[in-house]
């Protein structure tokens, strides 16, 4: 986990154990060769900037429960649009706020911030 101010998301591959070695190597290699960690982190930074004010206002009005519900709604919406997308990883199951760690089948986003 990387603690930063403002918050940042760091992405990495965590291949399921049921995948064979060849598929795991292919996914890791694809992720590295195309610079997806950096690309997704840059896109996530923009996303955090875009939702920061909204979530702060929501927190002031509805507290952590309201923020959790909003993040859950976003996670569902993102998963329906792109199951393996970086936004799905970032918003998945409101754990971004609660546990600071999110998992989807092959991509993990780690939330850092104070």
Image (cartoon, grey):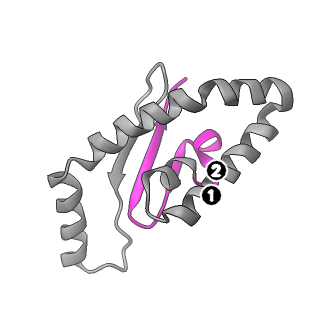
Query: Quick one: SS at disc 2?
Result: helix
Query: Quick one: SS at disc 1?
Result: helix
Asked if residue 66 lies left or right of residue 15, the reply is right
CA distance separating discs 1 and 2 = 5 Å
Q: Observer-nearest residue: 13 or 43?
A: 43
Residues tagged 1 and 2 counted as in contact (Cβ below 8 A): yes
Q: Quadrant of residue 84?
A: bottom left
Q: Is residue 75 magenta?
A: no
Give the image location of residue 63, x and y in percent. Answer: 81, 31
Q: Quadrant of residue 71?
A: top right
Query: Which residue corresponds to the image point at 47% horizontal and 19% vertical from the top-left?
Result: 5
Q: Quadrant of the C terminus?
A: top right
Task: Give the magenta part as a residue range.
Answer: 92-114
**Where does label 2 land, which residue?**
74
Give the image location of residue 105, x and y in percent. Answer: 44, 67
**Where does label 1 land, which residue?**
77
Query: Which residue corresponds to the image point at 51% horizontal and 47% vertical from the top-left?
Result: 90
Q: Quadrant of residue 20?
A: bottom left
Give the image location of residue 26, x and y in percent. Answer: 19, 69
Query: Which residue corresponds to the image point at 49% horizontal and 50% vertical from the top-left?
Result: 87
The correct choice, above or below, for 105 with respect to 12 in the image is: below
Q: Residue furthest top?
A: 5
Query: Which residue corresponds to the image point at 44% horizontal and 32% vertical from the top-left?
Result: 46
Give the image location of residue 37, x and y in percent. Answer: 29, 45
Q: Observer-nearest residue: 87 or 113?
A: 87
Q: Is residue 101 magenta?
A: yes
């Amino acid at each position: 986990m990387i603690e930063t101010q403002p918050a940042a998301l760091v992405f990495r591959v965590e291949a399921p154990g049921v995948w064979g070695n060849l598929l795991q190597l292919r996914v890791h290699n694809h992720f590295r060769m195309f610079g997806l960690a950096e690309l997704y982190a840059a896109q996530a930074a923009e996303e955090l900037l875009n939702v920061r004010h909204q979530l702060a206002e929501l927190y002031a009005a509805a507290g952590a429960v309201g923020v959790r519900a909003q993040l859950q709604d976003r996670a569902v919406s993102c998963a329906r649009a792109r199951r393996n997308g970086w936004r799905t990883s970032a918003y998945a199951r409101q754990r971004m706020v609660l546990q600071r760690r999110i998992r989807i089948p092959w991509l993990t986003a780690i939330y850092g911030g104070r």
